[in-house]
Structure formats: C-alpha cells, structure tokens
Image (cartoon, rainbow, N blue to C red):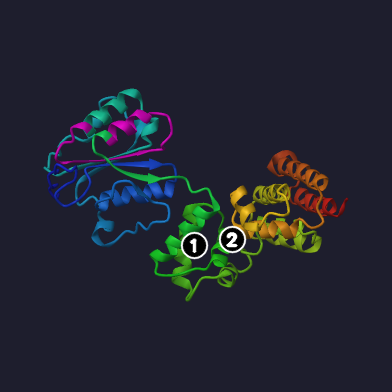
Amino acid sequence: MAVRSPVTKTGTTTTGQAALTLIVGEEELLVERAVKAALAGPVQAGTALVGTVLADTGAAAQDPAGGADVHDVMARDLAAGELSMLTSPSLFGGGTIAVIRAAHEASAAVVAEIGALAAAMPPDVTLVVTHSGGAKNKSLLTALQAAGAQRVDCPAVRRFGERMDFLRAEFARTGRKADDGGLRALLDAVGTDLRDLAAACDQLASDTTGVVNAQVIARYWRGRAEATGFSVADRALEGNLAQALAQLRWALAVGTAPVLITSALARGIRTLGQVGSVPRGKSGAAVASELAMPPWMVDKARQQLRGWTPAGLARAHSAVALADAQVKGEGASAGYALEHVIRVIVECRSQT
C-alpha cells in the first residue's frame, strides 16, 4: 500500500489532499460527488456544488484512495469507541481514510469522538464527514469548522432556476450546449431527480450532436417528452379535451406515474390562481419577480387564464384533490380517475 503523505499545518497532506473535509447538504448526488472529489484531490473551502462540475478524471477516479485503507460507514451504525479503531494505524503502514456519512444521525458519544479526532488529526488519517445541515447535531458542524475542515455545501436543488443551472453545468462538463427550450423540455421529459437528469445529459452528449434543443429532446425520447403530466395539465387547462385525453393515454402508456399527473394538474391550477390574483396592470417581469416564477411561466399562465374564473379554478382544484386520493389507492382505476378529472377541469373552464 502507498504510504500517506504527512499532514501540513494547513490541514492538507503534502500532495494537496484535504485531511479533514465537511460536506453539508441533503442533495444525494452532489454529496456523493463531493465525497469522491474529497478523496481524489483538494476541495476548495466553501465550495458550492450547485451549477459546478465535479468530474472523475484519470487514476484518481479509478483509485481515489491512493491505496489507503478506506472505511465508509453510516454514522448511526457507529458505536462508541469504534471510530478510533477505524482510524488506527494499519499493520501494513498505509494511511487510513474514514468517510462518516449522515453525521446528523450519530449518537452523542460518536459526535464527541468525531470532534475529538478532528481537533487532533493524526498525520496518516483523512476524515470526510457528511451532514444534512439541519439542527440535529449541529454543534458538530461548528466543531469541525473550528478544527479547520474544508467545507463543501450541497444544498437541495428545488427551484426551477437551480435545476436549469445544474443542467447547464452538466452539459458544459461534456463540452455541449443546450438552449433554454431544450433544458425545459428535458425537465419535462425526465423529471426533477438529479441522478436521472445527470444520466440523461450524459446520454444526450454521447448520442446527439449540436445544440440540444426541444426538438432534440422530443426526438430522443420518442414522444415521452410530449407526454408528461405537465403537457396533460397544459392541454386540460387550455380547455382542449381531445388533446388532453390523448396526452394522458400516451403518458400512461410510456409509464408516467398517475400521481405525477395529478401533481402537475394541481400545480398548474395553483399557478393560474397565483398569477390571476396579481393586478393585470403589472408587467410579466414584475409578476415573475413577485411570485418567484420564471417569466415564461407567467406568460403561459396568463394565456391559459382566458376562460377561467376564480370559482371555476376552485372547483377544478377540488376535483384534482379527489382524483389524487383516488390514484393513491382510494379509487378502483387510476386511469378512469384521471380521465374523469380532466373532463371536469375542461367543464370548469367553460363555466361562468
């Protein structure tokens, strides 16, 4: 086994690898990438991983531990005294890497041991700790940072703009570009799970050429991009019953979960209600800023609002709530419940 380099006064080995890394956040894909990056080489303190590229490269990706003993454990599985055993010197003289995951779930005794180890790091030990960032065991965050840990933030990617930034970064990692229409279509086709989105970007980069746009997404997924819960909701809210039912049947045929369709319907109705409650004199940009929505979503909602009344929206929202319960087990047929609610939504739009 390779002998680990000694730790310098800056808290890194002489090869530049961080001896103590704290990864904070609950976005699993980004946390996993941060762990790999911490083992492969130096991580810049305070790095935020949303919209950045962390790619495996060369020998470091194949053997990020560099031959050291690696112990990758969940904090909740550690018993008092076990950490010192994991980080004790190897009989063969090699270094030791300990990855402690979900430290917010550790017992009080283990939290104290992690803090003590961080405060006096042995020269042949590398410690990587992940923490959700919540209130539980938050004192450990303070202790690790006081010990000089290099912190990497991996916040949850929830907002539309953050997902768009993530996709742009994924395509940039592969040397490709995508326009906004293509990114939106990809979100509609794949969903919001970052692992699925990252895999989709890799597939598109290897299987297509040129700028990734909405046409590329539609062609690559062969209809899946058009047949999502959001496209079903759009056609229903626009009052186009025939197209809404056709999109629904195709979406179910390609495997879209019924609960995702009711979720899209509910979201669409809520968006109409939010946009409709804002005075009409305001510009689209002002409304987008006030409601924390992308401008294109406001413009689309204003077009869909034609023919809707507050009472109609309220009735449609109640119908979707009922359908949601039915597709989650209260109804005999999810397909029937979805077809029925789409018909009700179209009827509500035309009612005064």
Alpha carbons under labels 1 and 2: distance apart: 10 Å
Is residue 277 shown in magenta?
no
Magenta range:
119-145
Helix, strand, or loop for circle 1?
helix
The residue sitting at 72% across, 61% down in the picture is 247
- Horizontal and vertical percent position of residue 239: 80, 59
- Horizontal and vertical percent position of residue 304: 74, 58
Extreme residue in the bottom direction: 210
- Horizontal and vertical percent position of residue 154: 40, 46
Q: Earlier in the sequence, mark 1 or mark 2?
A: 2
Mark 1 is surrounded, within 10 Å at the Cα level, by few (under 14), some (14 to 19) or many (20 or more) other residues, namely some
Q: Is residue 132 above or below residue 348?
A: above
Helix, strand, or loop for circle 2?
helix
Q: Which residue is mark 1?
A: 200
Q: Which mark is residue 189?
A: 2
Label pair 1/2, CB-CB below 8 angstroms: yes
The residue sitting at 18% across, 32% down in the picture is 120
Q: Amino acid at mark 2?
A: Ala
